Image: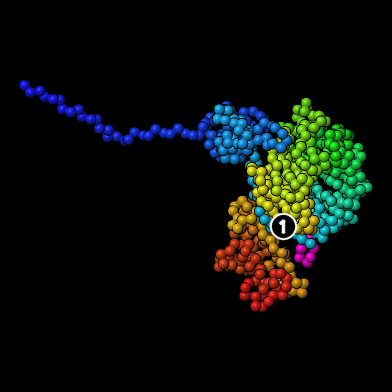
Amino acid sequence: MATLLPPPKRQKVYHGIEPPEPEPVSSVPNVVVQFVSEDSGQPLAPAVTFPADFGRDGLESLVNKLTPENEDPVPFSLYVSLPEKDTNSPTRIVIKNSIQEDVLKHSSKLFTPEDVITIYCSPQAVFKVRPATRCSSTLTEPNILSPGHSSPILCAAFSPTGAMLATGSGDNNARLWDINTETPSHVLVGHKGWVLCVEWEARERKLATGGHDGHVRLWDPKTGKPMGDALKGHSKWVTSLSWEPIHLNPKTPRLASSSKDGTVRVWSPGIRQCEYTLGGHTASVNVVRWGGGGLTGKGVLYTASSDRSVRVWDANGGKPLYTLKDHAHWVTTLALNTDFVLRTGSFDHTSKRPASDEEAQSMARARYDAIVSSVGELAISGSDDHTLFLWTLFSNNQADNKAKPTARLTGHQRQVSHVAFSPDGKWAASAGWDSAVRIWDGKTAKFVATLRGHVAPVYRLTWSADSRQLVSASKDSTLKLWNLKTYKIHTDLPGHTDEVYCVDFVADKIVSGGKDRTIKILTQLTSNPLPGSVHYRSRIIPLLPSKLQSILPTLPSRNDRALYTRLPTSFSAQASSGLSSSTFDLEQNILGGDSREGLDEVGTQEVLEIMRNEGVNFDEARLRRHHRILARHGIDPSGMPLDSKAVTRL
């Protein structure tokens, strides 16, 4: 019988999808992160785990999820604290990209994926100021078309709303400028010596000036007229001015003036008399600041002097409270963490204007309380001994209030020339004769970074309203706009031909003045302005006096003799900084023949035609139209008679 062999075994055939390749093990580790509020020091939530390459935007979104009290997303500053080694070592790592890039790969090698990484979160302003990139106006020496100062510009200050600018000069005059048009408004004549300081009342109803003649004068900003005679009493020049905060006295705020004669006088502008004199210093009083708190909550006066001391006085009567004698040389600068809100009063980024003094007082009080709610009112003093001191005299925690410095800030190699707190009080910046700017934590005074770029002493500093930008003015004739994320120069702003003595910041505008007798107004450069930008263009076109009268009837407006053209947008400058109040719409203003643009119906149509035919923007179209008007009258923009052969080039 034959043996039957079994059929060969059928092989199982796989008809499905190929099995997936095993995933490679990720080289990105997971990290455990604890988010902590910088203000309260409390964790926002339990620690969370996620990949180390999680981007900064994702971290910010996560923090917003962990803070449900914020209805809308809020920008946050995120950083990891470093142990303090010495005064020149950074004390934090700012997270710009991810934890992996910025923390785990940091040169300190202090953090590993096995650590619980504590990230401190600090909310930033909900509005953002656009960085200035170029000069939009140069207000120069007096002439038929540009009535400016004839001597160095010694001081400059924007009004609380940002609508006006006040400048003081060595020509014995102060001047008021309209910021919307960037043109002169009033000349304030009365001082018999240099105008050394200008100070706005927070309701913008008065302007105070102090001079080398020892006099203090008050002016009506609307008319440019003096409000009575000079306030006399100082025997030497006035060094500083400070108004009483309006959350303490909104109707008739008093004015404090310090002088080289070693005294501080407190004036009652209503009755035009000195209420009392503070005479405790034995040398020049270089700075006076009117604080908003104090032991009784009725205000205090801080004074810094060349007798190496800082003194604190009760503003209600002048009783001395503290004498601080820790500096070893002249105390030349002093700043409060409440300076910005005291200066601007009730005016903030919401563009809301108070209808009464009582409403202004309430709004100013709310802004002040928001700054001092966590640490109270702080002061920093700077000296020619190369150091600064942080003072905590009126903290919410009574145990912290003492007549000894909370911290000593060292690092400058030469005299400290200026110190300024950021508007939100979270940062402080100091400038020195060592050509450096140093950034400090505004609450603890820990060193953060050194900003280097100037090649000569730095005289003055000013912050943007959102606390994200810092501008420095120097003897080297430049202004520098600093990026506080990288601690490097964002924009170098040249333009002055000599030392820059003063600088101020409002909205997206920076104003500076100096030894070259010119005032520079700088703003953002953008060829195609986006919604949210405020763009200015200016050009001074001098005209020959003999031709002036013949051409005036043909010019679009008197302002075109010194052509300052505002390019409108649909965005309010006030939302950008809280210190201006002009909203424009480009198309409506062109078609409507807005008087601020100086265009009638004919001029409007001519500008629109140039824009259509030549493919240029409004700013350039209006400038070309103006050049053609000059050409028809035989005048070159330089002011010289025009060569007939060159007319076709226009």
| Residue at screen point 70% across, 32% down | 85
Direction bottom: furthest residue: 644
Quadrant occupied by the N terminus: top left
Specify whether 323 is left or right of 91.
right
Q: Is residue 419 above or below residue 184?
A: above
- Residue type of the residue flagged with mark 1: Gly
When asked about the image quadrant of residue 598, the answer is: bottom right
Specify whether 420 is left or right of 237.
left
| Residue at screen point 45% across, 32% down | 25
For disc 1, the marked residue is 495
Q: Is residue 323 above or below residue 158?
A: above
- Span highlighted in magenta in the image: 142-148
When asked about the image quadrant of residue 313, the answer is: top right
| Residue at screen point 41% across, 33% down | 23
Direction top: furthest residue: 1
Magenta span main SS: loop
